[in-house]
Amino acid sequence: MRIESDVEIPMRDGLALRANVFRPPDDGRYPAIMTLGPYPKDIHFADWDRVGFYEALEERGPHMHWETVNPEWWVPHGYSVIRVDARGTGNSPGRRTTLSRREAQDFHDAIEWAAAQPYSSGKVAVMGISYFAMNAWRIGALNPPHLAAIVPWEGALDLYRDANRHGGIASNTFTQGWNKNVEKHVSEGGAAESASAAAQRELIDDRVVRSHPDVTQMRVPLLSAANWGGAGLHLRGNLEGYALAGSTHKQLRIHVGNHCAPFYTLEGRLEQLRFLEHFLKGVDTGVTREPPIKLAVRLGGERYRWRYEYEWPLARTQWTPYFLDAGAGRLTPDVPSSASSASYDAGGPVGTDRLTFTTASFDEETELTGPVKLKLWLACEAGDADLMVRLIHRDRDGEEITYPAAVPPWVGAAYGWLRVSHRKLDPERSTPERPYLTHDEIQKTAPDQIVPVEVEIWPTCVVLEPGQRLELEVAAQDDPRLAPFTHTEPRDRIQRGKVTLHTGGDHDAHLLLPRIPPRD
């Protein structure tokens, strides 16, 4: 293949970004796969990797780059691969504007430049993992004329809700480490405040709103790839992006495995290739005639099976409430016969800082796939509290069944978060099964005031076998296995005072589960 380094791409303001171009050696015209981001294009995947993903990949090679396609595989399949250093990073001049509307406009200009090159067919796809997926949502919402498809693979959509502030609580551990690593590669000056930095403020303001992509305006074909193990960063965004996208053709894939490996497997590459061949080359690969959703149905541990579906959430979902009984510590399909309450110390040691509620053993195989909602009635002695919610899958012996995490090794069945003072709901966007919080107002409580809250638990997929149980945990601290997507900033965290949960009577505290019957 031909390799051109530090090719200049002019932007609308006169600045030129630098790109590396990998393309077939002949003089034909080929579609392009393009990425733009803050990971310098000349740093090899293995040199950027701090997690150990590279050693587990099916693909290797001298031109591998963090979370982008391998040109040694794609160029022989008839594609150009173009990697662009974002403004202010790598070899591109300017001031870094991470995940901002300005960066999306730069991407727009780069796509239109690529389409006009003599080696281009005029069609460009945007495909990559994580940050490159997050930029795919942003450029997709702008609909550049020559953008032919996007494949956001495990990439957050809503910086505030998906990444920086879960339920209003600062998710600082990952974002602080990420920012320090990226800032080492700022090309000149310093970085202007980015959209991601703005989203770390406690309340949503106009700057966050301006930088949020309106994917309802998207018209480009979409393949959104999520990971059930991506709690804390990317899972929610890929499902939201798929559901909201205005694209006529859109597909959703939800897989298992670590954050990078599925993208580089032969199975993953062939699925990407089928999609791009159809929309960039006009080859009828059949993708428009099959169900749009492909789910890995999790069976416990590393076991799963693939299944096709037609909509998200699944239309045949039986939304099933399980009511909390504080007196008995139970989750039951029946409303408790009497009112009761239970408390925990939000500032206490592990064990005293949480409450658990457990179902009876299931008497038949039960699949739960979709979003989960928890409604609580509670009083906060401190006037506020951070709620860390976890669903736990228990086997017949009471041992927890865990699942592969995007950042290994293992996580629980599902997670949700809420700061009680952020409980304000958006009535237009909330649904009976999924609360949508405005995050635009702080609502403290009186110490003895009992208030209702609805917690969004990120979507899950588990199959409980006969004899197994589901457990709900409401705690003041993270499950440590979620690291690095944890909430440890002492200036932000609210961990003090007694939190009392009220159930039964007038307090319809319940867990709303997405029970999936077999397809007719």
Image (tube, helix red, strand yellow):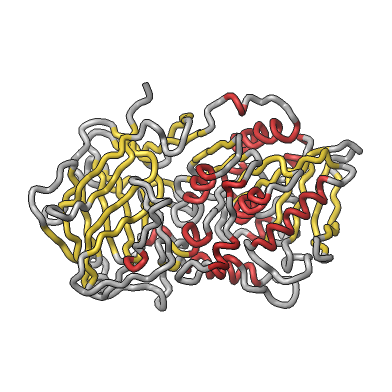
Q: Of all residues shown, which one is farthest toward the top?
A: 520
**Looking at the image, can residue 67 be seen?**
no
Q: In terms of depth relative to the viewer, which is nearer, 14 or 330?
A: 14
Q: Quadrant of the C terminus?
A: top left
Q: Is residue 92 above or below residue 280?
A: below
Q: Is residue 171 above or below residue 383?
A: above
**Residue 192's image quarter?**
bottom right
Q: Of all residues shown, which one is farthest toward the front?
A: 428
**Residue name at image x 55 percent, y 43 percent:** 225
Q: Is residue 76 left or right of residue 294?
A: right
Residue 188 x, y percent position in the rendering: 75, 74
Q: In terms of depth relative to the viewer, which is nearer, 229 or 334?
A: 334
**Residue 264's image quarter?**
top right
Residue 85 x, y percent position in the rendering: 74, 60
Q: Quadrant of the N terminus?
A: top right
**Residue name at image x 15 percent, y 52 percent:** 325
Q: Is residue 69 above or below residue 198?
A: above
**Residue name at image x 61 percent, y 27 percent:** 288
Q: Is residue 339 left or right of residue 209?
A: left
Q: How many marks?
A: 0
Q: Is residue 380 left or right of residue 55?
A: left
**Residue name at image x 43 percent, y 66 percent:** 440
**Looking at the image, can residue 72 be seen?**
yes
Residue 474 x, y percent position in the rendering: 27, 59
Q: Is residue 340 left or right of residue 309?
A: left
